[in-house]
Image (cartoon, rainbow, N blue to C red):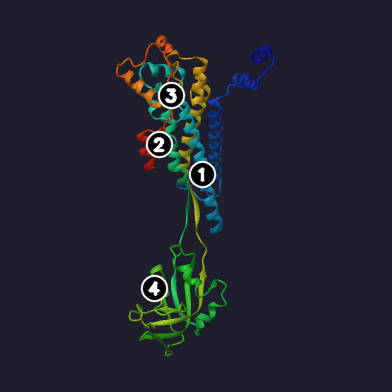
Amino acid sequence: MLQKLRGNSHLHWPDSELTKVTSNSRFHGWRVGVLFGVVSSATILCFNMAVLAFVASTKHGFEGGFAEPFNLEAHKLSRLSTLIHVLINALSTILLAASNFTMQVISSPTRDDLDKAYKSGEWFDVGVLSIRNLKQIPRRRLAICIVLGLSPIPLHLFYNSAAIYIATTNQYNVHIINQASWNWRNLGFDTAYEDLSRGEWRDQYDTALVHHGDLYIGFNETAKLINGELIVDTNWNPNTAWELGGDRTLIHFLASSNVNSTEWLNFTSKSDTITPAFPDYARVAQVFAHRAPRRDKIVFSLYLLVIVIACNTVKLITLVFVLLMEKSDFAVTLGDCAASFLHSPDPSTTRMCVYSRDSVIATVRSRAKGHNSRLPVEKVATEDPERWRKQRHPYATPVSRSSSIGEYFM
């Protein structure tokens, strides 16, 4: 069968055809990932510059370093702000992924790096982004890793802050008016006031952000609390009215009746401090709220946008430099290492294909201390190879102790 395959020299295997195509292309292997990073970074940079130009070209532009480009209703602004920040987080994640992949490539060893490390009793981490590798790579590649490692920090700090949603709350007063008075009757015909139900006004005003104006509460009965029971008191001037400064504490107290009813206002803390005096309780008949426009806004910061664009530009230049100037074949994955050693075998690793991680590390450390723990190549070739033994290992064994501790903290 083998002779037949050897005789079919005219056959073109798919793997060999793929190798020919990729070898003729400048972008193959790790360069494909870096190319995606370049395209993504360039696209995001163009987007950021377009946003800056759009905001600057709006009616008022940047004033004092800030701009308010959108003039929309409050609920639409809130949705737009959510979309903006979701987009910002997505773009930041793409830029971070591009940096991380390129850093892993640059910090990965070449075949020369592996040979030098073996001679000096050191080793490289392959297939992961390793800080340990930074001590053994050339300074130029180390500088690239530092730039790529630092550039995402300003992006994550300032990108989200470049567009801020500012929610505002309205100042208001609380008016307590007898429903039988002429003042109350006039409110019902004024379209500037919104009719709120007995329960709705509590939800609208007992909150940190109030979107209405003055609150008008009409009552039709007053009462006193005697022995736990409400005794209705009808001796009140129909034109009596009170005006109170509005705040959340007041609303919360007015709504907290001591009786099992949500229709009564609690004035027990106010009855002795204001003239005319308050009743202990008043029954809510109707509630009006003044319609007030919300002044929410989305503010863009010129300075933060410029910082984001500058960091984005530095990242793009660095990625382009790596893509065009780095000619080495980095061992980014374990498969790259296997391919390298299959293409150019290393005699010192003969018959070590099933060496355990612990055996390799023990050998390297012993060699680094000056002990000749490796037999000569010609002697290794005559020895029996390492035998595979079934062993039980915890899942955390391949991860170093420092990495495990860092994982737990994260």
Q: State the image coordinates of residue 153 (x, y, percent, origin top left).
A: 42, 38
Q: State the image coordinates of residue 291 (x, y, percent, origin top left).
A: 53, 68
Q: CA distance from mark 1 to mark 4?
A: 42 Å
Circle nearer the viewer, 3 or 1: 3
**Nearer the observer, 312 or 71:** 312
Q: CA distance from mark 3 to mark 1?
A: 29 Å
Q: CA distance from mark 4 to mark 2?
A: 57 Å
Circle nearer the viewer, 2 or 1: 2
On screen, residue 355 versus residue 196, left or right, reads: left
What amino acid type should be assigned to the residue bearing mark 1? Answer: Ile
User: SS of the residue at dot 2?
Assistant: loop
Precedes in sequence: disc 2 or disc 1:
1
What amino acid type should be assigned to the residue bearing mark 2? Answer: Ala
Precedes in sequence: disc 3 or disc 1:
1
What amino acid type should be assigned to the residue bearing mark 4? Answer: Phe
What amino acid type should be assigned to the residue bearing mark 3? Answer: Arg
Q: Residues within 10 Å of mark 4 (few under 14, many from 20)?
A: some
Residue position marked by numbered label 1 in the rendering: 88
Q: Residue furthest bottom?
A: 235
Mark 3–mark 2 CB contact (< 8 Å)? no
Q: Is residue 168 visible?
A: yes
Residue position marked by numbered label 3 in the rendering: 141
User: SS of the residue at dot 3?
Assistant: helix
Q: CA distance from mark 4 to mark 3?
A: 66 Å
Q: Residue at x 51, y 51 (%)?
A: 68
Residue position marked by numbered label 2 in the rendering: 396
Q: Residues within 10 Å of mark 1 (few under 14, many from 20)?
A: some
Residue position marked by numbered label 4 in the rendering: 253
Checking the image for residue 10, the label placed there is none
Residue 270's place in the image compared with 85, above or below, is below
